[in-house]
């Protein structure tokens, strides 16, 4: 299903504000690693948002996700203060680990191995 214009607008606003809130709360650096919001997807009714987190050099992603879930109420309160004039209702946030970078690294390794095998038969 294709995202509508309003969904994309709301997702962009949420992503920008969530990045600011994560920096403010110190959630962008967890355990020596970096957390960034790679994407936000909003349902057509604008009542739920899936927030995809990119975790870089974080040994325990489950711990980072649990820490963010523990601060979910505070995040939502700060978000509501920021976007109260743009949205009637603040969407329910669901946080997920974005593992696309892991897939990219795996694919690059596979291509390197294939190229090495072609060069050294």
Image (cartoon, rainbow, N blue to C red):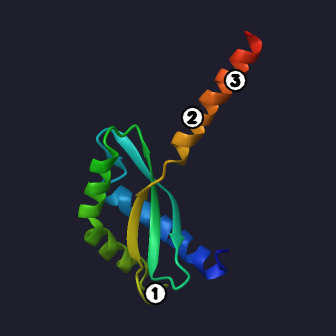
- Mark 1 residue element: loop
* Camera-nearest residue between 17 and 4: 4
Q: Earlier in the sequence, mark 3 or mark 2?
A: 2
Q: Determine whether 98 is above or below 84 in the image.
A: above
What label sits on residue 46 in the rendered view?
Answer: none
Q: Which residue is mark 2?
A: 106
* Camera-nearest residue between 35 and 83: 35
Residue 108 found in image quarter: top right
- Mark 2 residue element: helix
Residue 82 drawn at (x, y percent): 40, 76
| Quarter of the figure with the N terminus | bottom right
Spatial separation of the CA atoms under disc 1 and disc 3: 54 Å
Q: Determine whether 3 is above or below 52 in the image.
A: below
Asked if the residue under mark 3 is in contact with the one under mark 1, i.e. CB atoms within 8 Å, the reply is no
90 lies left or right of 112: left
Q: Residue at x 32, y 68 (%)?
A: 75
| Quarter of the figure with the C terminus | top right
Q: Earlier in the sequence, mark 1 or mark 3?
A: 1
Residue 93 drawn at (x, y percent): 39, 71
Q: Which residue is mark 3?
A: 114
Residue 32 drawn at (x, y percent): 32, 38
Q: Residue furthest bottom?
A: 88
Q: Earlier in the sequence, mark 2 or mark 1?
A: 1
Q: Residue at x 48, y 52 (%)?
A: 98
Q: Residues within 10 Å of mark 1 (few under 14, many from 20)?
A: few
39 lies left or right of 73: right
Spatial separation of the CA atoms under disc 3 and disc 2: 12 Å
* Camera-nearest residue between 74 and 92: 92
Q: Which residue is mark 1?
A: 85
């Amino acid at each position: 299903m294709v995202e509508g214009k309003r969904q994309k607008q709301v997702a962009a606003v949420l992503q920008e504000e969530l990045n600011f809130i994560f920096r403010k709360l110190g959630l962008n650096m967890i355990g020596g690693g970096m957390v960034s919001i790679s994407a936000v997807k909003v349902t057509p009714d604008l009542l739920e948002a899936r927030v995809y987190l990119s975790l870089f050099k974080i040994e325990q992603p489950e711990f980072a996700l649990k820490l963010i879930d523990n601060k979910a109420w505070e995040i939502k309160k700060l978000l509501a203060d920021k976007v109260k004039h743009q949205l009637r209702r603040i969407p329910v946030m669901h946080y997920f680990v974005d593992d696309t970078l892991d897939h990219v690294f795996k694919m690059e390794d596979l291509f390197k191995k294939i190229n090495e095998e072609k060069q050294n038969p």
